[in-house]
Each structure stands twice: as structure tokens, then as C-alpha cells.
Image (cartoon, rainbow, N blue to C red):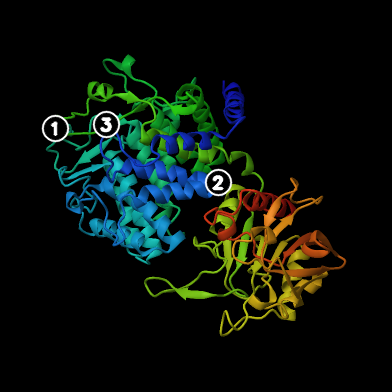
Amino acid sequence: MKKITIISFLFVCLQATAQHPLSRQLAETIMHTWSDSFSLDGKASKWTYDMGVVLKGIEGVWQNTGDGKYYRYIQQQMDRFVNEDGTIKTYKPGDFNIDNVNNGRLLLLLYQSSGKEKYLKAAKLLREQLRTQPRTSEGSFWHKLIYPSQVWLDGLYMAQPFYCEYAQLFHEDTAFDDIARQFILIEKHTRDPRTGLLFHAWDESKQQAWANKSTGTSPLVWARAMGWYATALVDVLDYFPADHPQRKELISILNRLTVALMKQQDKTTGLWYDVLNYSGPGKEKNYFEASASSQFVYAIAKGVRMGYLPATQLSMAKNGYAGIIRRFIKKENDRTNLQGTVKVSGLGGNPYRDGSFAYYMSEPVIANDPKGIGACLLAANEMEIVSTLGTAKKKMVVVDRYFNSEKKNDVTGVSEYWHYVWEERSNPGFSTLGHVFNNHGAILGSLDDRPSAANLKNASVYIIVDPDHIKDNPSPNYMDANDATVISDWVSAGGVLVLMTNDSANCELHHFNELANRFGISFTDKSRNMVKNDEFETGSVIAGNQPIFKQGRKMYLKEISVLTAKPPARALITKEDDVIMATAKYGKGMVFAVGDPWIYNEYLDGKKQLPSSFENYAAAGELVTWLLQQAKK
């Protein structure tokens, strides 16, 4: 059965993506359905968590394609609510509704990528809500002011990923203790020791009619509630400090959760029921539910990719994804639609929702509910990169922050690296390139110190970009003969070295050539592709017959330092007899050199809107594949 299911997975995925990847098909449906406003049920649009679920999915499509139209869609939708002074239309902080915090994740994205202060101000409003959000006696956030003493699994997704990313960005180190504690507490209070599943919610007061008078838990396990919780865990871990003592416990919770989910996955379809582990009266009315199945696939696939879960669990995600495509994806009226999402399920309120099986079965199941299609988009984004994850096999890719050591103060006054680094999401950053490496199974690292045999030991790829001169850094770290020997010895042992400079007016080349010359490469003072304004064609570079960019890519590079190449180096790409890119086989290792840092965010993530004929994102993917394949370490 398992073998047939995996074959089915491959077949249905190939069938679904033969014309267009499923993620982009779903994104087109979303952008058509909510083209100018995010209104639901024919009502005026408002600040709602549904929008955030969908837009996080769209963000994933943007990162996986480098197509700026997806970023612009996110910004367009958020700008309908965020005023120039940072206030948020329709948002009422006094409601203390934890759902309203979820969209803050998009505010942080837009602030980091654009630098616009209004997004930061809006994010601060949501952070202030969390500072005063009512809590249980142990410190867990209430779900809403109108739901006193209640913690719902849903709320962990709504608040904690934003809370964690905000804490990382703005150095709120004590917040991580609070975040971990809330995950641990809700598992303690809602986990069924018999099945390992988590009940939908917990009432500390035990006063609600739906609450067990002994434990305070709601009576049943609602799948989407567990989906919210699982998704929250894998997303929080993106920002949770690697050395925090509670990180291991969060990963343990995720593992316990997925083991319990494995037992609930339907063996035939790969899907999960709306109410898990229910065998009481009316059980025949239970149904496979699209949003929860998508959330589980996303959380499991991402957990495996990030190393939180064992690789063997990927088959669970593959079977689930195949089931989603078979049962819920429908092509209708030139649109790709997602069927089978329960519109909403809650507890309490007016009319009162008692948490019974009859109640859960009474809620309508609809097509293209934003929670469902957003979750399915997240799942598709993860599953579409499964085939590339084996390229690196957890190889370490290190970017230098010693020879290029530019810093600036962030909004809190803390000095941080910012130019050509993984963490930077604005134009000069490498966050998009880092995402491409991650999609190929690589682990990212940074080297802030002078290179040595010890600190390069675990690196497979070492990237040095734009070495500082005095204009960049009043105390630049120049390359010297000892540095060059350490690095060339590392290459000879099987490492892959990437050298990317700027033109001589914007980069230190004289000392840097101490290293490049070891491989027969020299960065010269001759500059070319000096683009003026939007004369983009001046920056065109065509990859002809060579081994890396196999599709003959047209790339955009500007203000290039022209190279010279002599053995062991060889020219890879030339333009009008000028060497633009070169490679050198050196011992067991390899060197790639180019006189422009052409794959930083500005020319990779699509925000700049280069003419569509340029293929920097696709070319970056081919370069990443080649670099990882060359690494022998």
C-alpha cells in the first residue's frame, strides 16, 4: 500500500504541475478572487487573520519564484489597511482579539524589505496588544477579551510567530521564554495522554459549558486547531534562538504531535478527518477536511526540511499532499479551486457552540475558503521543493562578514551587519539567495572572523563578496598572504569558493587579488555594463555554451569588474571579449568568480521589476545547484 501511495503521489503531482505548478495556480485563483480588496461573504473588507494566512502563502510563492508581482500583491492588500501614520483601519486593540495579531507577520516582511516606517509603526501597535493581552494565571494569552480564561490552539498560530519574529528583530530576548512557556503550557493542558492529540481549547476557569469540569478541556479534537498549532511550531522555530534552552522542548512537542497525527492519517486517501479520533454517534458524518490536511502536510514537510523531524516522516507529507490533489483540487472555469474546507469552528459565543460532534458537523464546508486555500498554498510551496532538497544534503554555505564587514545601526540602535548578508531583506541583502540555497537543502552560516582551518572546517561553500575599502569601513580587513593560503588550502581539500566583487570604484580589489591570483583569476580596474538610469539592456549578459547556466540565460549585471583568467582558471562567460565570469578547478575544489554581486535581493526578488527577459532568479538557481554539486566537503 505504501509503495502504491508514493507512486500515486508522483503521478498526481506531475499531472497537476504539468502546465503550471500548483502553488502558482492557487495564487492566480487568490489574486483573481480578491483582486482589489479582501472582502468575505460580500461584506466590507476588514483586518482579519484570514488575509494573513493567504498572504503568507503568497509570500512563499514569491520567494520560490522571484516574481515581484506576488510581493506587490501582498503590499497592495496590506496598504488597504495600513495608513501612513501606522494606524490600522478596522483594527480595535481594545478587543484583545488574538486573531488580529497574525497579520503582523506581513507588516514585518514589508518593513524589512521596503524600510517604510508605517509598517513598523503598525507592527508596534500589535506588539503593544500583546504586552497588555489578558492572560491565564500561568501566563498564557486569552483568546479574546470576550472569551475570558480561555486558550485555544488557534491562538498559538495567531500570535506566537509574529511575537517571535518581532522579538528577534528588536532584541527582546526575554520574550523567547514567554513564547516557549505558552507552547509548553497548552500542550500540558490539552494533550490527551491516550492518543497524544490535543483538544481544541482549554478553559482555566472550567466554567464554560463545553469545558470538562475536571480538566477544563473542550470535548473533542478538531483537526484545524491542531493544524494551527503545528504550523505555529515550525514557523516559530525560524526565529527562535538556536541556543535557547527551550528550543529542544519545542522540537520535542512537534515530534510528539506528528507521531500522533501519523496514527490518524487515513491509509487510503492520506488525509485527515475534521474531528480526529471520533468513534461516537454519527461518526459516519465525519469527513476529510482540506485546511487541516494542508496544515499537517506543510508542518511535516517543513519540519523534515529543517531537520526537526526524521526524514522518514516525509512519506506522511507526500501521501497527504497526493490526497489533497486527488480529492480537493478542482479545475473549474479556468481556475484552480480548493474544495472541502470547513468555514469556521469555534466554541462558546452567541449562538452557543458547545464543542459537540453534532456542532462541528453543522458548520458549512465551502470552496476556496481563505484559511483552506492559504494553508494549501503553504503546503504546495513546501512540496514543490522536495525534489531539490537532496542537492546539498545539509552542506553548509558560509557567507563572509570579515572582509566585507559593513554595519549600520538598526531601529533600536544596535549595530548589525547588513550588506550582502543572509539576514538582510532589503535590496542589498542576500535573503533571497539564502532561500534558494535552503530550497536545495543547504544550511546557512556566517563567518565574522578571519578565516582559519578550524572555522572553515564545516563549510562546503564559502562566499566572499565586495571586500571593504576605506569608504565602506574605516578599518577594513584586507586580504593578506596568510588569509589567501588558508582559503586556498581549504579549496584544495574540496571546498567551493565564490568570489564576487564590485567595480573598482566601489570595491577593494588590490589586496583581494592576493587570493584570486592563487587560482589564475584577477579582478581588473576595467569596468563595463555601466547602466544609466533604466537602460537595462546595457546590463545584459548572455550565458552561451557553458556548464552552469544550461538554458542560455539572459542575466542582468551592472558596473562589472572585468576579469582576467589564466590556468588553472578558464573563462566561463564573456561579453565582447571581456571575461565576465570564470571558474578554476583547484585541487579537489572549485572557484567561481564574477565582478558583480549580481544575485543580491535587488536583482533577484523581483521588486525592482527588471524587464521580463532577464532571468536572474532562474540563473541563481542553476548556479546554486552547480556550486553544491561541486562541493566535496
Q: CA distance from mark 3 to mark 2?
A: 32 Å
Give the residue at x 51% y 37%.
23
Mark 3 packing: few (<14 Cα in 10 Å), some, or many (20+)?
A: some
Mark 3 residue element: loop
Residue at label 3? 345
Residue at label 2? 64
Give the mark toward the camera: 3 or 2: 2
Q: CA distance from mark 2 to mark 1?
A: 43 Å
Residue at label 1? 350
Q: Position of residue 280 (x, y in %)?
A: 28, 18
Give the residue at x 59% y 58%.
603
Counting residues from the start of the chain, the first of labels 3 and 2 encountered is 2
Counting residues from the start of the chain, the first of labels 2 and 1 encountered is 2
Q: Residue 202, relative to residue 468: is it above or below?
A: above
Mark 1 packing: few (<14 Cα in 10 Å), some, or many (20+)?
A: few
Q: Nearer the viewer, residue 230 or 529?
A: 529
Location of the N terminus by quadrant is top right
**Which residue is the extreme one toward the left?**
207
Q: Position of residue 328 (x, y in %)?
A: 45, 24
Q: Nearer the viewer, residue 8 or 53?
A: 53
Q: Is residue 271 left or right of residue 220?
A: right
Q: Nearer the viewer, residue 58 or 137?
A: 58
**Which residue is the extreme one toward the right?**
567
